Image (spheres, rainbow, N blue to C red):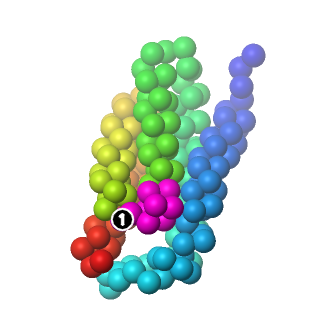
């Protein structure tokens, strides 16, 4: 039985946002405590902005994953692409546990560099399979690159 595209989209969106929800379990408690006491750069966005931005990005990621899944999981290049996507999604969630949970901006910065590499690899692979899916990852890539600069700034300032 073929799963309809709309069902893949819903599943993808829910799965990606579930990672964000899991990450929020360590992020939210730290916002008003440990994180509030850190020195932050002048370009640090207001705390309220992160939730809506990540919800949009996780939603786009879910749509993108569905777009690749729609190509058929019996093909090795599709399996490989979805495995890569899963790895970067896991790294995405892990960052919050390192930064906020362990309260370790340095370890989180090292991990975010790895995350950026995996996002770039996913972008290249997805774009090759279905062009629009790669391009929908660009806002995510840009936000994580910005988050990396922000993370590094926090390491330096603290």
| Residue 128, horizontal then vertical, whole percent | 36, 31
Visible residue check, residue 71:
yes
Please determine whether, in this image, residue 34 is positioned above or below residue 138: below
Residue at 37 percent across and 58 percent down: it is: 108
Q: Residue at x 54, y 80 (%)?
A: 33
Q: Position of residue 42 (x, y in %)?
A: 32, 85
Residue 47 can be seen, yes or no: no
Nearest the eye: 72 or 89:
89
* First to last magenta residue range: 97-105
Count of number-bearing discs: 1
Image quadrant containing the N terminus: top right
Extreme-left residue of the structure: 156
The quadrant the C terminus occupies is bottom left
Quadrant for residue 124, please give it: top left
Q: Nearer the viewer, residue 109 or 2?
A: 109
Q: Which residue is mark 1?
A: 105
Q: Residue furthest right?
A: 1
Give the residue at x 43% y 24%.
80
Q: Residue at x 47, y 76 (%)?
A: 35
Figure quadrant of residue 39: bottom left
Residue 146 in the image: x percent, y percent?
34, 65
């Amino acid at each position: 039985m073929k799963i309809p595209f709309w069902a893949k989209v819903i599943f993808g969106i829910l799965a990606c946002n579930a990672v964000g929800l899991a990450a929020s379990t360590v992020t939210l408690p730290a916002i008003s405590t440990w994180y509030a006491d850190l020195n932050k750069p002048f370009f640090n966005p207001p705390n309220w902005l992160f939730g809506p931005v990540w919800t949009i990005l996780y939603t786009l990621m879910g749509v993108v994953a569905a777009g690749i899944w729609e190509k058929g999981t019996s093909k090795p290049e599709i399996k490989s692409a979805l495995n890569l996507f899963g790895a970067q999604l896991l790294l995405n969630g892990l960052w919050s546990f390192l930064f906020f949970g362990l309260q370790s901006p340095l370890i989180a910065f090292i991990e975010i560099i790895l995350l950026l590499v995996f996002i770039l690899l996913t972008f290249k692979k997805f774009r090759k399979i279905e062009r629009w899916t790669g391009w929908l990852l660009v806002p995510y890539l840009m936000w994580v690159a910005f988050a990396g600069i922000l993370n590094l700034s926090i390491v330096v300032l603290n």
